[in-house]
Amino acid sequence: MGETILKGIPAAPGITIGKAYLIDSEDFAVTKRRITDQDLPDEINRFQDALISTRNEILKIKEKISKDMGVEHGEIFSAHLLVLEDTMLIEEVILKMKKEKVCVEYVFLDVLKKYIKTFSKMDDEYLKERISDINDVGKRILRNLVGAKQISLAELKEKVVIIAYDLSPSDTAIMHKKNVIGFATDIGGRTSHTAIMAKSLEIPAVVGLEKITTLVRNGDMLVIDGNRGLIITEPQKSTLEKYISEKKKLEELEKELSTLKNLPCETLDGHRIELSANIELPEEVSSVIKHGADGIGLYRSEFFYINRADLPSEDEQFKAYKEVAKKMGSKPVIIRTLDIGGDKFLSHLEIPREMNPFMGWRAIRFCLARPNIFKVQLRAILRASAFGKLKIMYPMISGIEELRQANSILSDVKKQLKKDRVPFDKEIEVGAMIEIPSAAITSDILAKEADFFSIGTNDLIQYALAVDRVNEKIAYLYEPAHPAVLRLIKKVIDNGHKEGIWVGMCGEMAGDPSLTLILLGLGLDEFSTSPISLPEIKKIIRAFKLETAKKTADKALTLSTGKEIQEFAQSTLKEVLPELVLGGG
Ligand code: PEP
Ligand code: MG
């Protein structure tokens, strides 16, 4: 085929050169293995064992969910059990295996795909709904058949570039950085949680390539250009040389930036900015410290809840939060309470599939509806607050009522802790994420009852512009610099300041160097982004006066389109720091 350049969406920066490792739309590869007549009984036994193990797994989950969340939720799994009892499906697999003499997992996947296809063509809505049950159970059976524990990505033996239709944030979370040196997916957007995970793991990644899984074969040599969102398949010698040299340059820039680590994040005229890091996993604290953050501005606690069959207990959470609090010492750590839903699912909580998951039953909505789950987390955070400087932040607050409800639950938990004589920080700050337009517009009201705001631009942009953040087809409309977004941000900052509270930003926009100057000029007090982006942001903040930033922001607010604003911001940055502008050095 020769060298081909594919354009996608840059998800995590950096350059990587390596061999492709294709995975099925699931997290393990199913290979076609021929079998003989003698192997047949063994294969049938394997199939039966996998069915039994799957049944036991589902029963266990059903029991646990019924206990934790009520019998009606447990009942969802009865439908899964029915799939396992479908004799037609089972017989078809055995017959096909006998006829085609191919291993059971391969045949099973084939039959499963056929079933799903047939069901998806049906007019009956009820039967259509069963697709997700069949899919879920099918995946479990396959996992048991190939003997994969939950996932095999963590156990890769050599360095590879993962190529997949999609990777869930939970898959990404357990990727072993040592062996996964890059990844590329057919779907996804810049602020999908898969992309965010890639950034925090410092794995170069490109998403939204549409057809990468059909164009690349296992073992193909690839270059991943995570800065520009390109994948080059079968690169020519000259392309390889170009990328090897660029990789070296980037490493040098990184080295230079690392010298800023111990310098304060302040403008030329001494205006101090809080520069914090976003983390998803407690293990990332070392990277936060390495990159010189002033604190953790967003600890996405939901990764604690995924890749497991049950809910994390209070003690387990307490230990993790305490460890992070202790490691960060006097530096603040903002723990965001559970933000499940959207593109992050917990299989055991069985949040029903929704037509619009990002606008559905997620985050604080879920927690307020499940106070027992919420209270466990709040208790754990409060207990850990005795060991460092923790703050609490609620995701997806849409208006004052939700903030009040959440605070009332928090106050109950505090009362109980006092009664139990358990120490915690009585002065703990409690803030709201501003990521829903209604919250931004009513931020004057919210500011009276919150200790701080953190603007979640990943969601705020998708809601303000009606652009699904994980949909690659409309990614061109996802514009952080859109005038509507800038106006909302300005409103939130101004309203926060009027009430004397600080306003930060923890969406990906905070780590976009081309917009740093505008955000600084709008008056943002804290920038929180992935640890790898921190040195660059610090370099920019240290290179300008606050006055210049204000002028840049004022001018930006007069422009009519996101593109104009982006270009204007980029050119202002380029005048002073050309080396930081892609292709501008
Ligand atoms: C956001 O929405 O900007 C944010 C930081 O939260 P998340 O990306 O986890 O939804
Ligand atoms: Mg969000």
Image (tube, rainbow, N blue to C red):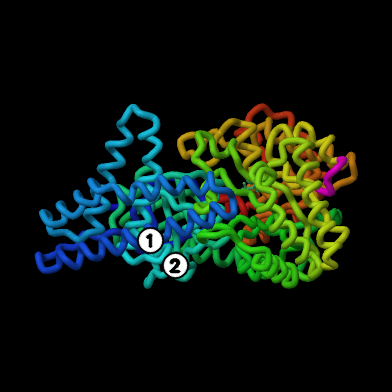
Magenta span contains residue 162: no
Looking at the rendered structure, the kind of residue marked 1 is Leu
The boundaries of the magenta stretch are 448-452
* Residue in the foreground of this view, choosing between 284 and 419: 419
Which residue occupies the foreground of this view, 380 or 69?
69
Q: Mark 1: which secondary structure?
A: helix
Residue 240 disc label: 1
What is the quadrant of the C terminus in the image?
bottom right
The question of residue 451 being in magenta is answered with yes
Q: Is residue 556 above or below residue 337?
A: above
Alpha carbons under labels 1 and 2: distance apart: 28 Å
Q: Mark 2 points at which residue?
A: 154
Please give the label number shown on residue 328: none
Q: Which residue is drawn at 85% across and 43% down?
A: 449
Q: In which quarter of the image is ligand 2?
A: top right
Q: Residue at x 57, y 36 (%)?
A: 478
Residue 18 appears in which quarter of the rendering? bottom left
Q: Name the residue rendered at 27%, 36% in the picture.
A: 118
Direction from residue 57 to residue 576 in the image, left or right: right
> In the rendered view, would you say 349 is above or below 487?
below
Q: Where is residue 311 in the image (x, y as percent from the top left)?
A: 58, 59
Query: How packed is label 1: few (under 14 Cα within 10 Å), some, or many (20 or more)?
Result: some
